[in-house]
Amino acid sequence: MINKLKAAIKGAKKIVFFTGAGMSTDSGIPDFRSATGLYNNNLHAEEILSHTYYMTHPKEFYEFYREKMLFPDALPNYGHEYIASLQDEKDVTVVTQNIDGLHQKAGSKKVYELHGSVNRNYCMKCHKFYSLEDILKTDGIPYCECGGIIKPDVVLYEEGLDEMTIHKATISIYDADTLVILGTSLNVYPAASFINYFNGKHLAIINKSSTPKDNMCDIIIHSSISDTFRQISKGD
């Protein structure tokens, strides 16, 4: 399968990488649904990361958010860097469920963040922008100078995805000749349904465990993303 994926990537002109939490585990950021993931170790994580909880318990939300969701020292891993390196010779798009910004930090230019980013924060009252660094300098509930509460630009449970981001992501997937799914259980909707727009030649998945969409793929690799890309890079 490694050689088949290598050939598919080499022959691709328009390629989309659809990435989930498993993309960033090699950077020290835990995933959500594995045995050691965030949700298995925090039974109320989905409740805490909901719009309702944020609005009604902002102090407790931010305590959890700072401790469990922010990894300011995390660096791109080999997988992020490999994807970014392909831009010199191909039309590469990243559609990601991740909020860590590591694809951009690695150099990827066309990235559609379905669930937002911890690197963007806005006052709910005046909409002033605040960086991740600004949030890290605060304790408790972060307030804007206007008095409004600052909210991370991340999609919480009960909130809808950005319509323009959805449009651009699905068009990119539809137009691609190769779609590579990386590090996602494909259990989170509507994001997981986006791969149904794919109409190209090769549909590949690299994930440590099986997914509900494996039967749609012609290339299936149950292994580490970074290790897989290192093997593909050998001899290039």
Image (cartoon, grey):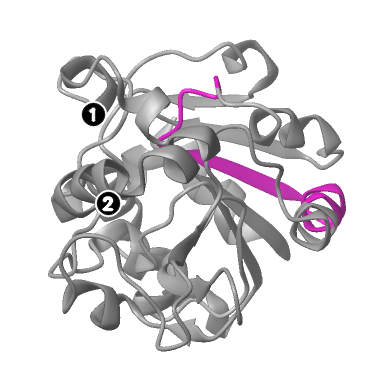
Q: Nearer the viewer, residue 87 or 29?
A: 29
Q: Find disc 2 in the rendering and name its residue.
A: 62
Q: Nearer the viewer, residue 164 or 121?
A: 121
Task: Look at the image and say whether residue 171 sits in the magenta stretch.
Answer: yes
Q: Tell me the tag on residue 216.
A: none
For marks 2 and 1, give the CA distance.
16 Å
Give the residue type at disc 1.
Leu
Residue at position x 50%, y 15% from top? 211
Residue 115's spot in the image, x, y percent?
56, 50
Left of 61 or right of it: where is 92? right
Quick check: 105 above or below 47? below
Residue at position x 16%, y 19% from top? 41
Q: Residues within 10 Å of mark 1 (few under 14, many from 20)?
A: some
Residue at position x 35%, y 63% from top? 80
Q: Find disc 1 in the rendering and name its residue.
A: 38
Left of 140 or right of it: where is 85? right
Q: Are marks 2 and 1 in contact (CB under 8 Å)?
A: no
Q: Quadrant of the N terminus?
A: top left
The secondary element bearing badge 1 is classed as helix
Quick check: 210 above or below 114? above
Residue 151's spot in the image, x, y percent?
46, 63
Q: Nearer the viewer, residue 35 or 211?
A: 35
Q: Residues within 10 Å of mark 2 (few under 14, many from 20)?
A: many
The span picked out in magenta is 170-187
Give the residue type at disc 2.
Tyr
Left of 16 or right of it: where is 26? left
| Callout in the foreground (2, 1) | 2
Residue at position x 75%, y 36% from top? 194
Quadrant of the rendered image containing residue 68: top left
Quadrant of the rendered image containing residue 79: bottom left
Instruction: Identify the residue at the far front of this view.
Output: 147
